[in-house]
Image (cartoon, grey):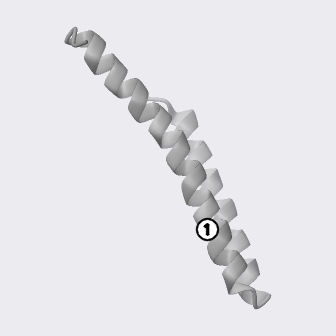
Amino acid sequence: MNLDLVFKIAGIGIIISVLNMVMKQAGKEEHGYIITLVGVVVVLGMVLGVIRDLFDTVRAMFQLY
């Protein structure tokens, strides 16, 4: 398993949570929500690439076309 991806996702999560707390303390909760949403979209994009590779591997393993 590729642990590099797990550490990248964890790092993004930590950065997003800190930015969200900073925005809440500054009274800009709307910006905090947008930052959180952007973080979720970025992580989802990273995970979708891995899922696509998984399906390609399964397809090649069972010779499905």
Q: Is residue 64 above or below residue 1?
A: above
Horizontal and vertical percent position of residue 33:
62, 75
Residue 50 appears left or right of 4: left
Q: Which of 13/44 is in front?
A: 44
**What residue is drawn where x is 60% and y is 50%?**
42
Residue 51, position as x, y percentages in the image: 39, 34
Tell me what residue is drawn at x 68 percent, y 76 percent. 32
Quarter of the image where the N terminus is located? top left
- Quadrant in which the C terminus is drawn: top left
Circle 1: residue type: Thr
Q: Is residue 31 visible?
A: yes
| Left/right of residue 61 with respect to residue 44 in the rendered view | left
Q: Name which residue lies at 80% across and 88% down.
A: 26
Horizontal and vertical percent position of residue 63? 22, 8
Q: Is residue 31 above or below residue 44?
A: below
Instruction: Read off the residue under disc 1.
Output: 36
